[in-house]
Image (cartoon, helix red, strand yellow):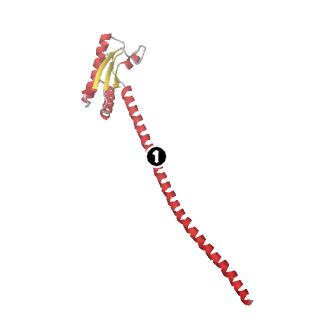
Amino acid sequence: MRKSVWIAMVLMLVVPGLLLTTSCAKKATSKNGPTVNSDDAARKAAEKARLAELERQKQLEAQRLEEERLKAEQMKKEARDEFENIYVHFSYDSSVLDDMAQDVLRSKAEWLRNNPESRALIEGHCDERGTVAYNLALGDRRAESAKRFLISLGIDASRLSTVSYGEERPIATGTGEAVWAKNRRAQFVIQ
């Protein structure tokens, strides 16, 4: 009987030990499987994050380039508007370019150099004093005077054309020297 108690006790200790060892072995095996899978999942997640960051950087660069393009377009439009909206003014009954008129024409020549594809129409204008025929001739002399000066600054004559409107297209209405001075001008239109 003693022997059978010893055998029972040994079996009671050995069987749970074997079960524990087998259970632990199964857990270890099952741990190795998910560990490999979790490493693979971590690599995939890291690659996905890297690709997402690259895409974000690409979008930021595209946005920056678009903003630069829009800014350049805006600056070009402003320069074009300035070219067209700053006039060369003349003294009464004159087509002589004073220092201020020459400075304006120098800036217009610079714009034309920077925009070689552009052509300009130079319009000659007068105030309301004088006959229609006289003012048309004076407007023509004013436009031609501005054209000659631009050509002397290196602008190709084929890019410039002139027209005279005389007193037909005033930009200021009324009478008096302040109004008349505004209307005595050469005005530029980009073609």
Q: Position of residue 52 (x, y in %)?
A: 49, 51
Q: Which residue is mark 1?
A: 59
The answer to which image quadrant residue 178 occupies is top left
Front residue of this view, candidates 61 and 122 = 61
Q: Residue at x 62, y 76 (%)?
A: 21
Vertical placement of residue 150 versus 171, above or below? below
- Residue 9, position as x, y percentages in the image: 71, 84
Q: Above or below — where is 51 with respect to 30?
A: above
- What is the tally of numbered marks visible in this picture? 1
* Label 1 packing within 10 angstroms: few (<14), some (14-19), many (20+): few
Q: Nearer the viewer, residue 37 or 190?
A: 37
Horizontal and vertical percent for residue 7? 70, 86
- Three-letter code for the amino acid on which mark 1 is drawn: Gln
| Viewer can see residue 96 | no
Q: Quadrant of the C terminus?
A: top left
Placement of the N terminus among the 4 image quadrants = bottom right
